Structures are given as structure tokens and as C-alpha cells.
Image (cartoon, rainbow, N blue to C red):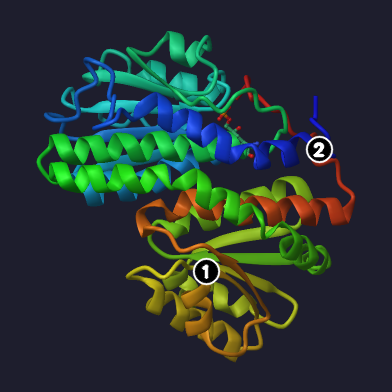
Amino acid sequence: DKGGYKHFMAKEIAEQPNVITDTLDAYLTETGIALPPPGLDLRKVDRLTLVACGTAFYACMTAKYWFETLARLPVDVDVASEFRYREPPVSPESVALFVSQSGETADTLAALRYCSGKAASIGAVVNVVESSIARESDHVLPLYAGPEIGVASTKAFSCQLTVLLILALKAAHDRGHLSDEGLAEKIAQLRTLPGLMNQALTIEEPASALSRRLSEARDVLFLGRGQMFPLAHEGALKMKEISYIHAEAYASGELKHGPIALVDEHVPVIVMAPRDHLYDKTVSNMQEVMARGGKVLLISDKSGIRQAGDGLWASLTLPEIDPLLAPILYAIPAQLLAYHTAVAKGTDVDQPRNLAKSVTVE
Ligand code: M6R
């Protein structure tokens, strides 16, 4: 049941404030965090291995920034299809987490089996708790996203990010890098997320108007720095997957190492830059694009957009947010732009060509 929406994807994008509330309710207590499950102890581990495919991989890539910065825990992150055949050394003091909406992705399951018996413990971050990946893990961290029908993963992604951020905060606290007050403050910030997501959803109209212009492009570039770099990847994947427009993501700082050669007035460049400590750097990369005639769409908050000055092709304004939580909020414009571009192109949004919801063969 599409609940009055034209597509499951639109419904699932709109459901995000509610499913994030469910996820927060499941993992946050009044005073702290009800995570990790007993036995999944991140205090003594020497590494964390995060493995997944597609959108779930981008959730892992974002989580690397959180675990390393907050908990000082080194993270190896990889796509399952590469990880499984590389014979990577797995430390017996490490924890390996496998992230999957369906819990049935063949490569992710094979990577899990490779780590089983080698790592100290195996965790599954899954939406389907009766899935193979959940069954073969020592610990299951459910997502509470509810059934996701659209092939493009949307609400499962924001729930994956939320669970991984909560786990990173807990690890930071347990490992002595975050005080009780610091943790309580971050938990209070997390509680504001559903309200901010509701506000972010109000950009749907301008996003849809912009998407009609994006739908004429042949190539689109997505740029981000720090924890917005994985989000740039996620934006590009969504765009490719459902609108069939070629989209690529780069770390903003990589621009002058090659991709800036692509920039001309025909290539929209979508920059995701909340006003965080990396904002100024990203803006200077953005100005390099504009100086070469590039059409920049800046996604930021009010002060970020004001600060960017003249010369933007377009902008989308999101509410201000604790920079740590920004990737979860900025998933919404990435999803809306892909969705409306696909609608403008008339593609089969919920069932894009050549793709399956659950990839159970490698
Ligand atoms: O069920 P999983 O999370 O393991 O699926 C992984 C990918 O196949 C999936 O995220 C895919 O990239 C999506 N269609 C992206 O929107």
C-alpha cells in the first residue's frame, strides 16, 4: 500500500521522521544508550571492520568518520564483493559488523562467513531480523525502518546511520573519549533529529523544481568533504539508480586532482556542505568550480548559503544541525533530488531497470 503516494520511494522518504523516532526509542533510554547488546563490547577491541554493499556501504563509510573521530577506534570499511576475496587479515581482537537492509545480500553474507571464527564477535545491522545475515551473527542490531519496498534504499539508510552513530557514541563513552555530560548532550541532539527531518522534508517543492532542470543533464557531480563525502556517494548512487543519469561523487579536495576537467556549464555540481569546521574548505573548492563556469547547487543551512555569496546556480536550505548528525539529515535532499529527477524523466522509480531489491546472487 503506497498510502496515497505515487511511489513507494516517496512514501518511504516521507516516513523517515517516524522510523527514526522508532529507532531512537529502541536504542536510547532516558539517561543513556541501550547498546551494544551484551557481549558486543567495543571497549577492548583493536579494530572495527564494517562491510556492506551499495547504500549500506555508504552508511558504513560515514560511520568510519564517527568511530575514528569520536571513539578513536580504527575502522576498516569495504564493499563486500572486494572484502570477501581479498583474504584480509582479521584480528581476533576485532569486531566485524555487516550492514544490510535485507539481510540476504550474497556478498555481505559471504564476507560475514569469512570473518566468522576469526573476529572476536560478529554483529548484524539489519532491517530484516529473521534474515540469513542476522541468523549467522552473534549480535543483531535491528533498524526499525519497517518494510522497504522501493528498490532505492532510503529509510533503511537513515536508520543504518542512526544505529551506527549511536553505537559510535556508546563506544566513545565506554572507551573514555566522551564524558557523561558529553554523551547526554549528544543524545539530546539525536532526539531533535525527527523534528529537523520534518523540516528538511519541506524542501520537496524547490527540490522538485530543480530536479526538472537536473533531468536535462547528462552528467552530475556530487561533492562533499569529511562525513559528507560518503553522502555525496549516496547522492550519486541514488541519482544513477533511478534516473539513469550518470552521476559521480568526489571528495571536494580531490577536485583539482582530475575531475575539475569535467566541469563546464552543462555539468551540475551538487555540493553538500553544512556549516561545519570543513565548510570554508568546501566553499573554496566550490568557487573553483564556479570560476570555470560550473553550475553549483549548494545544499547547506541558512548561514552556509549566505556565506557562499553570489554565483550559485541554485541552493537548498536545510535547518541548522549538530554537524555530527548532518549526514542523516542531508540524506533527505539527496533522496528527493534523485526521486524528482527520475519522476521528471518518467523512469520506473520503484523498480528501476536491471535492478533487484535483494541481491541474493553475486
Ligand atoms: O539489502 P542490502 O542493504 O544488503 O542491499 C545492499 C544494496 O544492494 C542496496 O543498498 C542497493 O545499493 C540499493 N538499491 C541502493 O539504493
Q: What's the residue at 27%, 30% (across, down)?
A: 33
The number of discs equals 2
Q: Classify residue 141 as left or right of residue 289.
A: left
Rendered view: 322 above or below 352 = below
Q: Which mark is residue 40?
A: none
Occupied quadrant, residue 36: top left
For numbered disc 2, what is the local secondary structure? Answer: loop
- Which residue corresponds to mark 1? 300
**Residue 11's spot in the image, x, y percent?**
73, 37
Occupied quadrant, residue 213: bottom right
Q: Classify residue 74 as left or right of residue 126.
A: left
- Which residue corresponds to mark 2? 7
Is the residue marked by circle 1 packed among few (<14), some (14-19), or many (20+) residues within 10 Å? Answer: many
For the question of whether residue 244 can be seen, the reply is: no
Q: Classify residue 38 as left or right of residue 18.
A: left
Q: What's the residue at 46%, 42% (across, down)?
A: 59
Amino acid at the residue labelled 1: Ser
For the question of whether residue 224 can be seen, the reply is: yes
**Residue 32's spot in the image, x, y percent?**
25, 32
Q: What's the residue at 80%, 51% (across, down)?
A: 342
Rendered view: 336 above or below 144 = below
- The mark nearer the N terminus, 1 or 2, is 2
Q: What is the spatial separation of the Cα atoms under label 1 and label 2, in whole angstroms?
A: 27 Å
